[in-house]
Image (cartoon, rainbow, N blue to C red):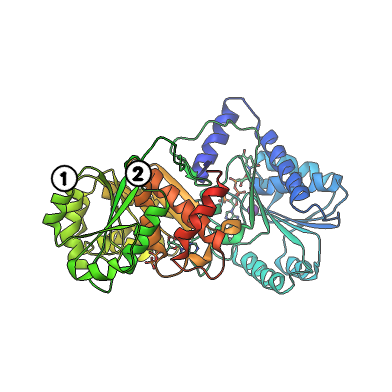
Amino acid sequence: MSEILSSAQMRGIEQQAIASGAVAGLELMERAGAGVVAQIATVFPDLPPSTALILCGPGNNGGDGFVIARLLHERGWDIDLHLLGDPARLPPDARSNYQRWAAIGPVTPWNDAKIEDLLDKMASGLVVDALFGTGLTRPMPPETARTWHGFATLLHRAQNARPQVVAVDIPSGLCSDSGRDFEGAFWADLTVSFHRAKWGHYLAPSGPPEGGAARCGLVVTVDIGLPQAPAPGSVQLVERPSSFLGKTMRAHKYGHGHALVLAGGAGKGGAARLAARAALRVGAGLVTVAASQPAIAEHAAQLTAIMLRALPDGYTLRGMLQDERLNALCLGPGLGAARAQDMVPAALWAKRATVLDADALTAFADDPAPYFAQLHDKVVLTPHLGEFRQLFPDLAARLAAPVSRGPAYSKIEAVRAAAARAGCVVLLKGPDTVIADPSGRAALHSATGANAAPWLATAGSGDVLAGLACGLMARGHSAFDAAANAAWLHAAAARAFGPGLIAEDLPEMLPQVFRELGL
Ligand SMILES: NC(=O)C1=CN([C@@H]2O[C@H](COP(=O)(O)OP(=O)(O)OC[C@H]3O[C@@H](n4cnc5c(N)ncnc54)[C@H](OP(=O)(O)O)[C@@H]3O)[C@@H](O)[C@H]2O)[C@@H](O)CC1
Ligand SMILES: Nc1ncnc2c1ncn2[C@@H]1O[C@H](COP(=O)(O)OP(=O)(O)O)[C@@H](O)[C@H]1O
Ligand SMILES: [K+]
């Protein structure tokens, strides 16, 4: 896992390093610009020097642009540099680099019509977007957004005859905390960020307009010599499973836990069976499906390694949970609202590791306060956005509100607030899956860019995710780790299968995913 930062955290780290005398702002800017130029050479090794259109803004992002212009010029590029704003009002480090560049080549004052014309004619080379970075807190000037929109449309049409677009720190117009588009944000083939990636690089607010991850292209982070100590309250990007997933020679099946997946009525058992299969494949030692009596025959015809019990009501569940070996529970997939209302309090009473999904979330949406009061630190809630909206309508409304000023409210803040209110781990699903616990610990799993897993948008894939988290908790993972690892395994399984994926395929891809992890 690596850490990702908010703009305020990044500013704090920079300011502290500069104030302590460890490094000068000008030095940071030089390393930032050099980092971008080095990444251009690495990511586009076959791109010969030609014309680089460099768009500089009025703040330090523009300052990076002047450094990039100078360094690309040294490498033989023709630079066509345009500055939005008054050079006299540039912040000091940016002004120094403006002056260094102005001694080498011209600075053209910003003119949207002219830039639009230039962009229209560019069939190769580079466009460097150094207009706005982490300091942007309001929409770009509307003409600039319009100019870019015209160019972006053109580029999409001319895939093979167009320049490469490189964003400095973040595509201009994006909120680096939320990934929201302030309006008319740029997009890039390559985004080079500094020190750490920002939340907005990986969050994927759904459109229109699409934000963050959809606009950044390849995100690369370069070291600019800032202290490496983790920032307080930073968010972890889930890049690999964080806990041991193998099985050791000495452990027997009970050493890997016994997961209990509750199912609902007759004809509604598929979702619970998907969850149970996922729990078994992820390595739980034993998995039992507990169904209502009328559904037993149906399950019996479908289940083999998974055991089956009849479970009429919550009272019986309390009795069943006297068996301490049943150490992780999954309630929700296909459970039905009435059965959820009966079973969930009984499950929570037992204080076991518990995943609550689907009906075990929505059945309590009318009056969530007493439900939240029963939740505890071994519980994971796994809502999609619609279920989240039902349980946390105010937080969902803040997320959906139109954005005019930044930093905009982000999915990370919403899930942190939800976890604090619910008193348990909350995993909010999506191409950007955010996990948080009540202490504010948070992680983001991004199924975007090279990690995209769009075939997960298929009925039942959420049931598999719930089963994975339950199976991992049966194996001893904490609620937070189980949620984060489940999100990673879920997307890895989807990518391993590829197009045509349906939910049943996901558990069956785990052996391949585990082999690739070296288990
Ligand atoms: N600090 C460091 O050590 C390092 C920083 N680095 C770099 O600095 C970047 C952050 O720089 P930043 O904080 O100066 O803000 P930036 O993203 O350039 O934009 C803010 C500017 O835009 C202006 N503005 C906003 N909206 C506007 C509008 N609609 N129309 C017109 N103007 C508008 C806004 O004006 P104001 O709000 O003040 O009126 C302000 O001037 C960061 O992303 C990284 O690239 C690296 O060099 C590494 C070392
Ligand atoms: N476009 C997508 N990219 C990545 N993951 C996705 C995408 N669409 C859905 N998912 C994932 O698929 C799962 C769908 O869960 P859910 O909406 O509960 O579906 P269901 O109720 O049918 O099981 C979630 O884990 C979600 O993160
Ligand atoms: K930028």
Q: Is residue 107 left or right of residue 226?
A: right
Percent across and percent down for residue 132 are: 62, 53
Q: What x and y, as percent, mark residue 310?
A: 19, 61
Check disc 2 and report its element: helix, strand or loop. helix
* Quarter of the figure with residue 74: top right
Q: Amino acid at mark 1?
A: Gln
Q: For residue 144, what is the image quadrant? A: bottom right
Residue at numbered disc 1: 322
Q: Residues within 10 Å of mark 1 (few under 14, many from 20)?
A: few
**In the image, farthest residue toward the top:** 21
Q: As rendered, which of 492 and 150 lies closer to the eye?
A: 492
For discs 2 and 1, the disc positioned in front in the rendered view: 2
Q: Quadrant of residue 82?
A: bottom right
Mark 2 and mark 1 in contact? Answer it, CB < 8 Å: no
Element carrying mark 1? loop
From this viewpoint, is residue 91 visible?
A: yes
Marks 2 and 1, how far apart in space? 19 Å
The percent position of residue 62, horizontal first and vertical second, equals 68, 49
Residue 21, percent across and down? 61, 25
Give the mark nearest the N terminus, 2 or 1.
Answer: 2
Q: From the viewer's perspective, tell me whether residue 371 is left or right of residue 230.
A: left
Q: Is residue 406 visible?
A: no
Q: Name the mark on residue 253.
A: 2
